[in-house]
Image (spheres, rainbow, N blue to C red):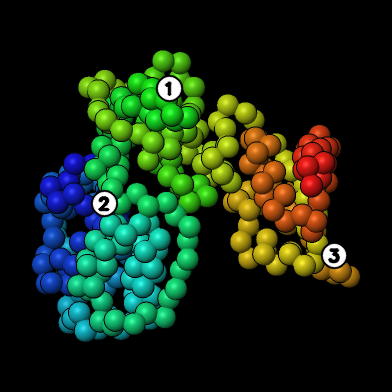
Amino acid sequence: MGYKHDYDKTMTRLVNILKKLYDGETLSVTELAEEFNTSTRTIQRDFNEKLISFPIEKSGKRWKMQDGFAIEKLASVEDQLILDMLEKVSYNMGNSFALRAKKLLSTIKNKDISPIYAKLDIEDIGNKIKDINIIEKAIEEKQILTCKYHIDKKVYDIGLKPLKIANFDGFWYLIALDSRNNTLKKYHIKSMTNLNIVDKKFTRSKKLDDSLKNAINIWFSIENEPFDVRLHVDSEIARYFQRKPISKSQTITSINSDDGSIELSIKITHKMEIIPTILRWLPNIKVLEPAWLKDTVISKVQEYLKEV
């Protein structure tokens, strides 16, 4: 979005709001919406949802730090850890983004050494912030985007209806509908250039948001009906699936008390949502259902063994 200060819409906006509060300012939702070039509803959601754990309060129509709270009191475990995590995650989003985030976060933190370390393989999009601002504005305003898309050493002029920015496996994508035929597509953001907003509106359905909640990777589909996959996971790796489910649809259907293995069920919309995960954990994972997916995995393993 075209912010006056070129701020990132989410994390950087929140950090700047916090900085203003810790500096003793009382903030107006309307004024913040104008400064960050967003809606008042978005700013209200920032205060009521995203910043709810911080010591802030509403005074009339404005927001401020709670009475008696000073920046030195930021030593509370919860608030300090939140800021530490934000900073460490920013390191994995590229140098230019990390430097900007670190500078902003340092104004509201009290210590230089953090106990938090986070290693995420996230693509560096620090040099694409202006493009992302444009995309976010088009998404919010439901306006069509045009751009040049670079893929396989070719360049295509495309028009699209932007729906959501998403990160899968560390790569940043724009999920959108092709403006010509309304088919769902996923565009690698760093492969997009010359972005422009067309003064033409479009409508979107809630189906995408529902599909994204259960999506495992970029292969998800909104055209295909979800289907169940049952997996057997042996005891050597079962704890990893219990700690971090494959998706929000994952359900552990049984636990074998004798050997510690588990069976689980997930819903997917495309076979490639789950095949990379299965191949990654072989031989400690097996497909129970559907049979055709089990056969597909076996076939891929056999093809690989032929080349060894």
Residue 96 percent location from the top left of the image: 28, 57
Residue 275 percent location from the top left of the image: 69, 43
Residue 259 percent location from the top left of the image: 86, 69
- Disc number at residue 178? 1
The residue lying at 37 percent from left, 64 percent from top is 91
What amino acid type is highlighted by mark number 2?
Answer: Asp
| Residue that mark 3 sits on | 256
**Figure disc tally:** 3
Left or right? Give the position of 136 relative to 272: left
Label 2 SS: loop
What amino acid type is highlighted by mark number 1?
Answer: Asp
> For the residues carrying marks 1 and 3, which lies nearer the camera in this image?
1
The quarter of the picture where the N terminus appears is: top left
Q: Quadrant of residue 97?
A: bottom left
What amino acid type is highlighted by mark number 3?
Answer: Asn
Q: Quadrant of residue 195?
A: top left
> For the residues carrying marks 3 and 2, which lies nearer the camera in this image?
2
Label 3 SS: loop
Q: Earlier in the sequence, mark 1 or mark 2?
A: 2
Q: Is residue 58 above or below residue 140?
A: below
Label 1 SS: strand
- Disc number at residue 8? 2
Q: Nearer the viewer, residue 226 or 183?
A: 183
Q: Earlier in the sequence, mark 1 or mark 3?
A: 1
How would you rate the neighbour count of disc 1 (Cα within 10 Å): few for under 14, some for 14-19, many for 20 or more? some
